[in-house]
Image (cartoon, rainbow, N blue to C red):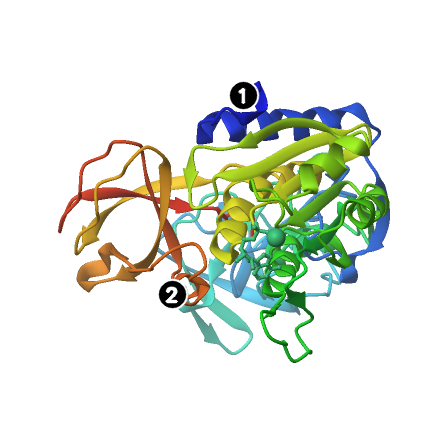
Amino acid sequence: MTSLDALVPYEEALARIVAAAEELRDSRTPATRQVGLWDASGYVLAEDVVADRDQPPFARSAMDGYAVRSVDVMGPEVRLRVVGEVAAGQTASAPLGPGEAIAIMTGAPVPEGADAVQMVEKTRRDGEHVIVAGPLKSGHNIAPQGEDARAGAVVVERGRVIESLTAGVLGSVGAGHVTVYQRPRATVMTTGDELVGLEEVPGPGQIRDSNRRTLMALLEREWCRVVDGGIVADDLAETRRAIREGLEGDVLVLSGGVSAGVYDLVRQALEDEGVEILFHKVRIKPGKPLLFGRHPGGLVFGLPGNPVSTFVTGLMLMAPALRILGHRPEHRTWYVRVPLEGTLPATAGRTSFHPAHIVLGDHDRMAVRYCPWHGSADQYSFARANALIRREPGEPAATDGDLVRVAIPHPLASW
Ligand code: AMP
Ligand code: MG
């Protein structure tokens, strides 16, 4: 038995994948590109973006009402002469003098001479005049120039994902084009003589190649540019040729052919093509055989062929590496402890991920329900789940109300 045949605990396997991905990311100049802000949603910003001018750019009224001099409004009620109006987008035509008021709308620049705004609800118009409730302090209902951000201050940091409000903030400071990180390039290929394309009619003994679809969708969700490497026959020469092409991207993902069968040729083919294998077996269920390797240009995942194993190892071990290579702000899986509804069997020797349903009960109380399934080929039960319950080796059975650990692989990273 070589060290590659040792069963690596889940956390150790994950740590080794994370370390290799970070090393690869940090060893090269990050690939970036310019995108127009209208096309930038979902990208990670590769530069700090600064305010092009003070925000707000002028002292701004926070209310609809009347701009006044606070020294004129010392008493409980003051009568002032209305000398003009300033709406949002306008500027006052003349400065405000003693005893005067200017009608002002939210967002309009405060006229010169004024230092407070009384909201319209606390005023009463009387022809040319307005009766204003006081007293008012200087600065009342005025947002000072530069209160939110000073010109030159960073408003969105490098590494943030451009989403709704972040995109709006970039727009507010005139960032019409931004520098973003390129999406990592991943090639997916599936191995197996039994596989036919999704559009084909399977013959005797054949099945449809569902894993390629699963993995491509998973990789797209992790912000990769995905190259479809097709189906590879269980033949060493053909597997080697396909791998050689697949190694051109940042990540090569293979499904199947990593167990101990006579036709499981992926490891041999990868070694023949110069890929350094870092481990081949992980102490998890589903998904024990999982091959992780690297070469100077990228990482390689050989995922087990059973559809559920492919999915769980893809989500819990491969996806973090892609988030790292994509410079995404969070690569970790988050966990929460949630009360169980129903029961869970005891766990044997491997870290286990059970399909589960998170439900929201009365009074916003979360609960999690185990979804029964019958093995790594049962993608039908598993696909109905919306969460994974994680259990450690040797954990006893759990029953109603016990807190169990639920994995959240996609924590909120930004707006
Ligand atoms: P393997 O890891 O190649 O031994 O495959 C394990 C099991 O997963 C076998 O029953 C395969 O038929 C099935 N399988 C392998 N590849 C795929 C695939 N691409 N789509 C669906 N099932 C697959
Ligand atoms: Mg196979």
Asked if disc 2 and disc 1 are in contact, CB closer than 8 Å, the reply is no
Above or below, comparing residue 281 to residue 286 in the picture: above
Above or below, comparing residue 265 to residue 75 in the picture: above
Indicate the position of residue 261 as horizontal and vertical percent values.
Answer: 57, 44
Q: Nearer the viewer, residue 188 or 158?
A: 188
Q: Which image quadrant is residue 363 in?
A: bottom left
- Number of numbered tags placed on the structure image: 2
Above or below, comparing residue 178 to residue 41 in the picture: above
Q: Residues within 10 Å of mark 1 (few under 14, many from 20)?
A: few
Residue denoted by label 2: 381
Quarter the N terminus occupies = top right
Is 322 situated left or right of 182 in this image? left
Indicate the position of residue 127 as horizontal and vertical percent values.
Answer: 52, 78
Q: Residue furthest left?
A: 400
Any atom of ligand 1 within 8 Å of the CB at mark 1?
no
Q: Residues within 10 Å of mark 2 (few under 14, many from 20)?
A: some
Residue denoted by label 1: 1
Identified by mark 2, the residue type is Ser
Label 2 – label 1 distance at C-alpha: 36 Å
